[in-house]
């Protein structure tokens, strides 16, 4: 009788422990929704799901920050490395994709598929700035390519360029993004 009570108690304890771990894990995976404001320009331009498109290969460009769902993004970590993320459009549910990842390739939105072309390394810099670099896997050179806005005008494409780490040039600031207003926690 004592063995059965002990066994039942052990099972109940194990189940409560598993539920606690699941609750903690789900809280850690809460995803914040925010805007990505480009750091080069003082006129408040945000990463934008251009034209409110919902299909694959939808353009990602800069547009005046408006707070619309086409400018709201979520970052979800990939695996245990908290600096590797996928970036998802709240409007379309598609993920930021780099395609082949070559210099001057435009970023676009595509069905989220957990492929390497949708994984980005977040590299934090001074003043809450961050650069977004394609993640090519462990051991690969990570600092060669960055996401960059090529201009300040509405409709400017966001594309891959060689990273510039000089801390002062236009290219350096065009490769910096800031997290804008936190809109909600789903």
Image (spheres, grey):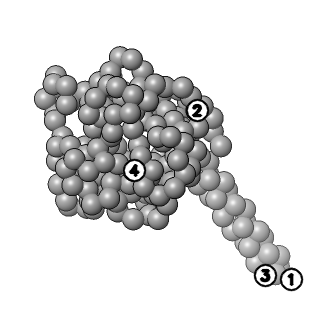
Q: Are marks 1 and 3 in contact (CB under 8 Å)?
A: yes
Q: Which residue is mark 3?
A: 3
Residue 40: image x %, image y %? 29, 24
Residue 167, placed above or below residue 157? above
State how far apart marks 4 and 3 are (Cα).
Answer: 61 Å
Nearer to the camera, 93 or 183: 93
Q: Position of residue 170 (x, y in %)?
A: 19, 25
Q: How dense is the environment of label 2, judged by Cα within 10 Å: few (below 14), some, or many (20 and up)?
A: few
Give the CA distance from mark 1 to mark 4: 64 Å
Residue sitting at 16 percent across and 25 percent down?
169
Q: Which residue is mark 2?
A: 68
Label 3 sits on a secondary structure element that is helix
N-terminal of the pair, mark 4 or mark 3, is: 3
Please report whichever mark, 1 or 4, sits nearer to the chain's N-terminal start.
1
Real-space CA distance between mark 1 and mark 3, rounded to the nearest whole angstrom = 5 Å
Q: In this figure, which residue is indicated by the disc labeled 1?
A: 1
Real-space CA distance between mark 4 and mark 2, rounded to the nearest whole angstrom: 18 Å
The residue pinned by badge 4 equals: 108
Rendered location of residue 132, percent (x, y): 32, 42
Residue at the image point whose x is 54% and y is 39% from the top? 70
Q: Secondary structure at mark 2?
A: loop
Q: Residue at the left extreme?
A: 166
């Amino acid at each position: 009788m004592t063995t059965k009570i002990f066994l039942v108690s052990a099972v109940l304890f194990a189940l409560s422990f598993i539920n606690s771990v699941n609750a903690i894990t789900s809280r850690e995976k809460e995803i914040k929704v925010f805007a990505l404001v480009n750091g080069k320009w003082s006129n408040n331009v945000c990463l934008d799901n251009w034209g409110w498109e919902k299909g694959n290969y939808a353009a990602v460009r800069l547009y005046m920050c408006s707070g619309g769902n086409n400018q709201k993004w979520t970052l979800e970590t990939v695996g245990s490395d908290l600096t590797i993320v996928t970036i998802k459009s709240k409007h379309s549910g598609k993920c930021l994709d780099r395609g082949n990842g070559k210099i001057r390739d435009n970023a676009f939105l595509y069905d989220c598929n957990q492929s390497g072309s949708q994984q980005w390394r977040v590299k934090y810099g001074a003043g809450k700035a961050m650069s977004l670099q394609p993640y090519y896997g462990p051991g690969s050179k990570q600092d060669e390519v960055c996401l960059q806005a090529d201009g300040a005008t509405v409709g400017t494409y966001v594309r891959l360029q060689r990273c510039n780490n000089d801390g002062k040039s236009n290219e350096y600031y065009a490769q910096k993004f800031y997290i804008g207003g936190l809109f909600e926690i789903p």
